[in-house]
Amino acid sequence: MSEKRLVMLGPPGAGKGTQAQWLCDALDIPHLATGDMLRGAVANNTEVGQQVRPFMEQGRLVPDDVVVNVVVEAIDEAKKTTPNGYVLDGFPRTMRQADALQKVLAKRKEKIDKVILINTPDEVVQERLMQRRSCPDPLCGAVYNVKSKPARTAGICDNCAKTLIVRDDDRPETIRVRQQPNRRFTVR
Ligand code: ADP
């Protein structure tokens, strides 16, 4: 199969993760979601995790150079087992990230094949994020919706039986910050 390098764009809560997973299953390529990677780093308390924790807890974007490094490492790692491509979900999210990605790919004589934009109205996104429940285990990372995709047993992950949580950045006050077009502020 020819390589497929895809990018999913859209506001937080647009449904990128769900659509990306379908694509990955259909094309047999890995789903590289920056949010999952960064949450994994925080959960494992790695050096990157300690660096990004304050940004993520407040729903702010983490610094470009940190995310770019995390993504490039993930692309390299994915290539070892699945050379057919990948779906990037949650990246790039700023012009600098897009430029950095393009530079890295150009050096390798590679390019992004398709960019898919999922545009969802703010009100729909807000409702979905408040209904979202997530598995806290970074190795599981399952996502539920209390209305449209409830867990089999309320509050318990179907896959790993951990107690589901509302992500810190899915709380109403943080959702409002995440919806601002430019949410890059200094963390106090
Ligand atoms: P959402 O798309 O709902 O914001 P994600 O799971 O994609 O959720 O991301 C969670 C958090 O991780 C973001 O709020 C942000 O702090 C950080 N993050 C994820 N991707 C990026 C990125 N490309 N650039 C900067 N920060 C990011």
Image (tube, rainbow, N blue to C red):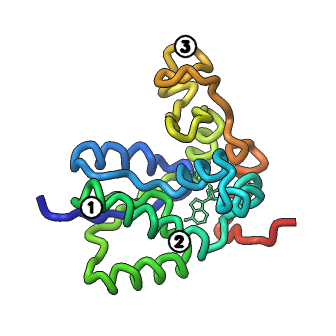
Under mark 1, the amino acid is Gly
Residue shown at 53% from the left, 80% from the top:
95
Residue 153: give its label. 3
Residue 69: give its label. 2
Name the residue nearer the viewer: 40 or 119.
40
**What x and y, as percent, mark residue 91?**
48, 65
- Binning the other alpha carbons within 10 Å of mark 2 as few (below 14), some (14 to 19) or many (20 upward) gives some
Q: In the picture, which quadrant includes the N terminus?
A: bottom left
Q: SS at mark 2?
A: helix
Instruction: Give the vertical position of 138 relative to 42 (above or below).
Output: above
Q: Please report contact status of discs 1 and 3: CB closer than 8 Å, yes or no.
A: no
Q: Nearer the viewer, mark 1 or mark 3?
A: 1
- Binning the other alpha carbons within 10 Å of mark 3 as few (below 14), some (14 to 19) or many (20 upward) gives few
Under mark 3, the amino acid is Thr
Quadrant of the rendered structure where residue 184 is?
bottom right
Q: SS at mark 1?
A: strand
Under mark 2, the amino acid is Asn
Instruction: Give the vertical position of 139 relative to 71 (above or below).
Output: above
Q: Quadrant of ligand 1?
A: bottom right
Q: Please report contact status of discs 2 and 3: CB closer than 8 Å, yes or no.
A: no
Residue 85: give its label. 1
Gap in angstroms between the C-alphas marked 1 and 2: 18 Å
Name the residue nearer the viewer: 60 or 34.
34
